[in-house]
């Protein structure tokens, strides 16, 4: 793997740093002026774009969607409608979709929803995805970093990014104001804040791990702050030993805040932990910005408005707060779609600003990947997400998106559960991970 | 319902007319055609849908295949998958095998309770239908639903019914993997034992299994000749003796079915564990197999097949034992 391909988008490329937005717009405009037709409407665009493909862009395109919850489903429909194409949407429950993806990808719909990073690359490497490098010629608003995140190991593009959502420590503004808490900038301040909360009878950290994935975020963040982004990438790539002192240090650091966790982490769902944050029983909660979706927009809007987040505090000043986790969701094309021209037209449209604007208008819980998407309609949390990602130097995906998902779920996920159940067992746990790691190829 | 139909065929077979073999040769041409259609087609479907996949799984368990590329990219690796699951993934395989073993013992206990309930309900108590419905209710629900009910309504640590009623510190029924008891086996570098969350799952499984066995046994009891019972009571048997000496032996075919179902249920346990997203400590063979073969991480078809073959050999061992026993008795 080359370093370039592994890199997720860097913040200036993401284009949400408010400082640099203007320059980005200018450069995007320059590209457009340079002769690339902006793909606002797939129909018109396609005839010139991908003449080689079979099918007719006006014909029916099938679209495999895992946006099965009510709100995202409506949002996705709005995005599709904005493309103005003849699209047949097949929506599958998102858990089922993910679980059956191995089978599904062999006979998929023309265009399908998926995730960036290792998860896309693994399938691209197995030759079951369609090369959409030519579509990228029509996506001038996607920055170089997103292009890298959409590129397979062979240097071709297989993915169109749609949006992303960062992981950060969420808190309730009113609680922090009321108790006079300050946002911790480094690890010592974080521990100090935890002590204050304990003294005030508040559990410092809401914490969940049902399903085995929520605490992967905590591992990632402590690892990124302790050992830096490059180490994260090479650890996820199977190139580092899990019995290394650097990995042990992550768990040692983690151990110091475990006392401030809600008890019994392993069986709690992320929703229950979010409820504890909402009730002000717990002070802080590390999760993706989707945490707000636990609260009902009708009756709990005051809680949603009261939730804010801050970047994970500094552990090692060398790394500062240079990395953030922000998984990217988007689309891929089948290897041999029934309607290739239509599929590419749809992908071009979905990569455009109009589609993501339509999506976020319905479901504003994430941030657009397209640098020309409307940001003036962003709510405070979206604005902040953009700033958070903009102020970071590196963007990681997530533990189970940056490495072999089987290794993530069955080896690291189990290890984290074992660690949380008995932190003193960490040496055994890590040597088991290292042993089991040897059976994975990380290709 | 599958259970009862098995019962009736079993009863029919339990009293076979003597000299069946001689009669077989007397089949007319038409009989043979009917026999071919009625036995041949199901047999063909059975072989195509059960034994061919089983054979393919056996072959896959000696291969390395990512489940995505064309199948001709699979390469033979000998016994490596087996070596991997028995030595490297031993911390997943052996707890799962142990949990399945615990399940066999536990479900037999539950079957006994089911039989007891059936026996009581057969007494035409007042409101027996109501009781029957209550006990049978969990069986009507899909097992996945049973899993979700227990997970979110009963076991939830922060708001679950059991934790509201429980006077002490809340218990994490879903995630607590600490062992209630444990012991060490010679070659394993970790202890085996019954973890708290699996013990909690056992309760949920009992809730369902008891009703299932109860209905099955109740059907048998209804068909039991009441005159035998009368005779027993005239001979001075008390309730327990009547059951132990007359009813229970008289329902032998159903007892066998109950035993078979109990073992099969214990070995194939999957759904409730999966509905609780298989927290550490609750793994059973069924979830190990499925998680390795399907899902996003299902890129290790060989290893998953090896897990599958371990489960398959356990099941087939039991089935062979059962078939041999059954035929031996009939021939006798």
Image: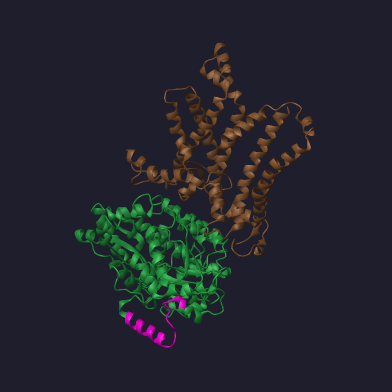
Q: Is residue A169 left or right of residue A339?
A: left
Say which of B102 and A85 sits in front: A85
- Span of residues in magenta: A21-43
In the image, is residue B19 above or below residue A190?
above
Residue A228 visible, this orientation? no
Q: Residue placed at 45% from the left, 47% from the top?
A: B177
- Residue A30 located within the stretch drawn in magenta: yes
Provide residue A339's location: percent of width, then percent of height.
Answer: 54, 71
Say which of A355 and A423 sits in front: A355
Q: Main secondary structure of the magenta part?
A: helix
Q: For residue B216, what is the image quadrant? A: top right
Provide residue B157's location: percent of width, then percent of height.
Answer: 36, 46
Q: Is residue B169 left or right of residue A67?
A: left
- Residue B11 located within the stretch drawn in magenta: no
Say which of A161 and A218 sits in front: A161
Q: Colour of chain A?
A: green
Q: Which chain is assigned brown?
A: B
Provide residue B297's location: percent of width, then percent of height.
Answer: 53, 59
Provide residue A146's location: percent of width, then percent of height.
Answer: 44, 75
Q: For residue A153, what is the image quadrant? A: bottom right
Quarter holding the C terminus of chain B is top right
In the image, is residue A88 above or below residue B159?
below
Quarter holding the N terminus of chain B is top right
Say which of A179 and A175 sits in front: A175
């Amino acid at each position: 793997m080359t370093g370039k391909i592994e890199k997720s988008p860097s913040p200036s490329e993401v284009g949400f740093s408010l400082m640099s937005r203007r320059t980005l717009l200018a450069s995007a405009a320059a590209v457009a002026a340079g002769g690339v037709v902006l793909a606002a409407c797939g129909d018109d665009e396609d005839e010139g774009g991908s003449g080689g493909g079979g099918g007719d862009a006006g014909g029916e395109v099938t679209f495999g969607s895992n946006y099965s919850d009510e709100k995202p489903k409506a949002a996705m429909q709005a995005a599709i409608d904005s493309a103005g194409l003849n699209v047949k949407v097949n929506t599958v429950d998102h858990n089922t979709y993910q679980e059956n993806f191995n089978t599904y990808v062999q006979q998929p719909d023309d265009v399908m929803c998926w995730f960036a990073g290792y998860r896309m690359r693994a399938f691209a490497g197995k030759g079951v995805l369609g090369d959409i490098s030519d579509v990228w010629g029509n996506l001038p608003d996607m920055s170089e970093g997103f292009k890298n995140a959409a590129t397979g190991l062979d240097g071709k593009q297989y993915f169109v990014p749609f949006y992303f959502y960062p992981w950060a420590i969420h808190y309730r503004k009113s609680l922090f104001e009321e108790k006079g808490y300050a946002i911790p900038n480094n690890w010592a301040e974080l521990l100090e804040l935890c002590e204050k909360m304990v003294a005030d009878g508040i559990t410092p950290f809401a914490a969940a791990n049902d399903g085995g994935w929520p605490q992967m975020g905590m591992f990632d963040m402590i690892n990124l702050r302790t050992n830096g982004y490059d180490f994260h990438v090479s650890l996820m790539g199977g190139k580092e030993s899990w019995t290394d002192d650097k990995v042990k240090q992550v768990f040692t650091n983690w151990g110091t805040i475990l006392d401030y966790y809600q008890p019994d982490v392993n069986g709690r769902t992320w929703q229950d932990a979010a409820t504890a944050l909402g009730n002000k029983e717990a002070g802080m909660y590390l999760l993706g910005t989707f945490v707000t979706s636990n609260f009902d927009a009708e009756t709990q809007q005051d809680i949603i408005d009261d939730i804010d987040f801050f970047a994970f505090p500094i552990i090692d000043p060398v790394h500062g707060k240079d990395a953030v986790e922000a998984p990217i969701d988007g689309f891929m094309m089948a290897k041999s779609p029934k309607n290739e021209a239509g599929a590419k037209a749809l992908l071009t449209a979905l990569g455009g600003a109009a589609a993501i604007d339509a999506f976020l208008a319905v479901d504003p819980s994430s941030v657009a990947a397209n640098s020309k998407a409307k940001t003036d309609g962003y709510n405070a949390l979206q604005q902040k997400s953009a700033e958070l990602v903009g102020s970071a130097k590196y963007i990681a995906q997530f533990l189970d998106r940056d490495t072999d998902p089987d290794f993530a779920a069955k080896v690291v996920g189990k290890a984290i559960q074992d660690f949380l159940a008995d932190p003193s067992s960490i040496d055994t746990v890590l040597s088991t991970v290292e042993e089991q790691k040897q059976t994975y190829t990380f290709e | 319902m599958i259970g009862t139909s098995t019962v009736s065929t079993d009863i029919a077979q339990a009293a076979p007319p003597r000299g069946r073999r001689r009669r077989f040769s007397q089949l007319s041409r038409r009989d043979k055609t009917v026999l071919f259609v009625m036995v041949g087609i199901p047999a063909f479907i059975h072989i195509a849908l059960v034994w061919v996949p089983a054979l393919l799984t056996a072959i896959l368990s000696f291969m390395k295949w990512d489940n995505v590329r064309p199948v001709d990219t699979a390469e033979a690796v000998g016994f490596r998958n087996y070596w991997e699951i028995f030595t490297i993934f031993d911390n997943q395989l052996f707890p799962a095998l142990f949990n399945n073993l615990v399940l066999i013992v536990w479900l037999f206990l539950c079957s006994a309770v089911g039989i007891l309930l059936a026996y009581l309900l057969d007494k035409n108590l007042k409101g027996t239908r109501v009781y029957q419905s209550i006990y049978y209710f969990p069986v009507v629900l899909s097992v996945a639903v049973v899993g979700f009910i227990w997970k979110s309504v009963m076991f939830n640590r922060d708001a679950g019914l059991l934790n509201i009623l429980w006077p002490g510190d809340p218990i994490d029924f879903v995630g607590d993997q600490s062992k209630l008891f444990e012991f060490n086996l010679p070659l394993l570098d970790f202890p085996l034992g019954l973890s708290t969350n699996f013990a909690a799952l056992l309760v949920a499984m009992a809730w369902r299994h008891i009703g299932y066995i109860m209905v099955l046994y109740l059907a048998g009891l209804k068909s039991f000749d009441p005159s035998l019972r009368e005779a027993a009571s005239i001979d001075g048997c008390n309730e327990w003796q009547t059951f132990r000496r007359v009813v229970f032996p008289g329902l032998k075919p159903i007892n066998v079915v109950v035993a078979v179902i109990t073992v099969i249920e214990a070995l194939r346990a999957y759904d409730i564990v999966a509905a609780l997203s298989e927290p550490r400590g609750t793994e059973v063979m069924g979830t190990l197999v499925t998680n390795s073969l399907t899902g996003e991480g299902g890129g290790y078809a060989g290893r998953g097949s090896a897990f599958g073959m371990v489960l398959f050999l356990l099941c087939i061992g039991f089935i062979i034992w059962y078939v041999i026993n059954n035929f031996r008795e009939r021939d006798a």
